[in-house]
Amino acid sequence: MNTDDIANIFTKCLYYKDFVTDKTGCKTIEIVGASFHADKPAIFGVPNEDYIQRELEWYKSCSLNVYDSPCGPPEI
């Protein structure tokens, strides 16, 4: 399988509303046991290279504090 195969599975699940509902009632698409060759940079959309580099910078710093992230703390 490759990224196009995963995108097709996701699209079919979305079309047929084949969702998994978590304990809070949130619906999501779950593809269990997916193994694929990442032959493209993304399954959907275009990766944000600037964001990726900032995340990697934080990861390499070994900090566990979200306030140390160059991206800033996540909004909740």
Image: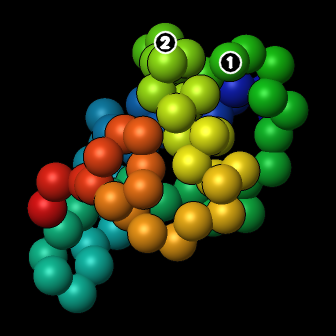
Q: Where is residue 49 in the image (x, y as percent from the top left)?
A: 55, 17
Q: Position of residue 36 (x, y in %)?
A: 81, 40
In the picture provided, is 47 more to the left or to the right than 37?
Answer: left
Residue 32 quadrant: bottom right
Residue for point 68% across, 18% down = 41
Residue 7 in view here? no
Going by the numbered disc 1, the residue's amino acid type is: Pro
Residue furthest to the bottom in view is: 23
Q: Where is residue 15 in the image (x, y as percent from the top left)?
A: 31, 34
Residue 26, above or below 28: below
In the picture provided, is 10 more to the left or to the right than 31?
Answer: left
Q: Residue 41 carries which label?
A: 1
Residue 50 in view here? yes
In the picture provided, is 48 more to the left or to the right than 5?
Answer: left
Residue 13 quadrant: top left
Q: What element carries label 2?
A: loop
User: Which of marks 1 and 2 precedes in the sequence?
Assistant: 1
Mark 1 crowdedness (10 Å alpha carbons): few <14, some 14-19, many ≥20: few
Residue for point 48% across, 60% down = 30
Cβ–Cβ under 8 Å for marks 2 and 1: yes
Q: Is mark 1 on a helix, strand or loop?
A: loop
Q: Residue 20 carries which label?
A: none
Quadrant position of the N terminus in the picture: top right
Residue 70, above or below 25: above
Residue for point 18% across, 68% down = 26
Quadrant position of the C terminus in the picture: bottom left
Residue for point 85% across, 32% down = 37
Q: State the residue position of label 2.
A: 46
Residue 23, above or below 66: below
* Front-most of residues 57 and 74: 57
Going by the numbered disc 2, the residue's amino acid type is: Val
